[in-house]
Amino acid sequence: MDLLLVRHAEPVRITAEEGGGGPVDPVLTERGVDQAHRLARWLAREPIDHIVSSPLARAHQTAAPLAALHGLDVEIIDGLREYDSEADSYIPVEELKAAKDPRWDAMVRGDWQSFGGESPEQFRARIVAHMNELVDAHRGRTVAVVCHGGVVNTYLGSILAIAQPLWFDPIYTSISRVRANSGGIRSVASVNEAGHLVGSRDPE
């Protein structure tokens, strides 16, 4: 079976002050909504049998246009939430990286507990378990998994034996493909596809 791992589209920025002290759940920006629709049109002709999503707004809002074009419902899987889903702010990682924010260094090191996240070990175990459940439940089918950058990094890293928790930068709405069989073999077919953000499959 095939897994299409999709990172969510661009979400709004929420500071700790704006978040009010509790876990934040940002929705998509206007550009993010456009990215989600581009993704849906790009995958409209692919044989997707099932769509699952993280419960966070930025993920299931990204999944919605794809589900509509395929006439499918979106299954929400709580275990696909990001490692920092309880954080009191959401600052895009590219902004943290550009500003050399200490939180970026902590993310790369895997020191996620310092800002309210899980340990990389706990996170990897959770994500791999849920992906294995999807493989077992949908043999011979194609499943789109709309989730988060950390989820994509961690699952691909587990297949490629990459120890570093965050080892590449998934583009918003990028697609990474995994082929899996019931014998337990997993192979990465592609990483970070983003042709839909610059082109179209529609004939001119």
Image (cartoon, rainbow, N blue to C red):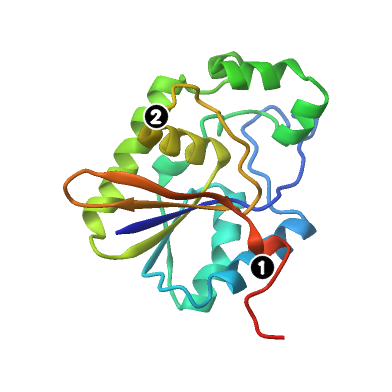
Identify which residue, 14 or 162, lies in the foreground. Answer: 162
**Residue placed farthest to the left in the image?**
183
For mark 2, give the secondary structure. helix
Could you say which quadrant of the image residue 95 lies in? top right
Q: Residue at x 65, y 37 (%)?
A: 24
Percent across and percent down for residue 154 are: 46, 33
Q: Check if mark 2's residue and mark 1's residue have beta carbons within 8 Å.
A: no
Which residue in the protein does label 1 denote? 38
How far separated are the C-alphas under marks 2 and 1? 30 Å
**Above-or-below relation of 67 to 123:** below
Q: Quadrant of residue 61?
A: bottom right
Q: Amino acid at mark 1?
A: Arg
Q: Which residue is at 65% across, 64% downward?
A: 196
Q: Is 110 left, or right, of 135 in this rendering?
A: right
Mark number for residue 177?
none
Quarter in which the N terminus is drawn = bottom left
Residue on which the image places disc 2: 124
Q: Could you tell which of marks 2 and 1 lies nearer the N-terminus?
A: 1
Crowdedness near tag 1: few (<14), some (14–19) or many (≥20) residues, C-alpha within 10 Å: many
Q: Amino acid at mark 2?
A: Arg
Q: Position of residue 100 (x, y in %)?
A: 79, 20
Question: Can you tell which quarter of the image residue 41 is in?
Answer: bottom right
Q: Position of residue 179 (x, y in %)?
A: 34, 53
Q: Is residue 130 above or below residue 48?
A: above
Can you say whether 72 is above or below 180 in the image?
A: below
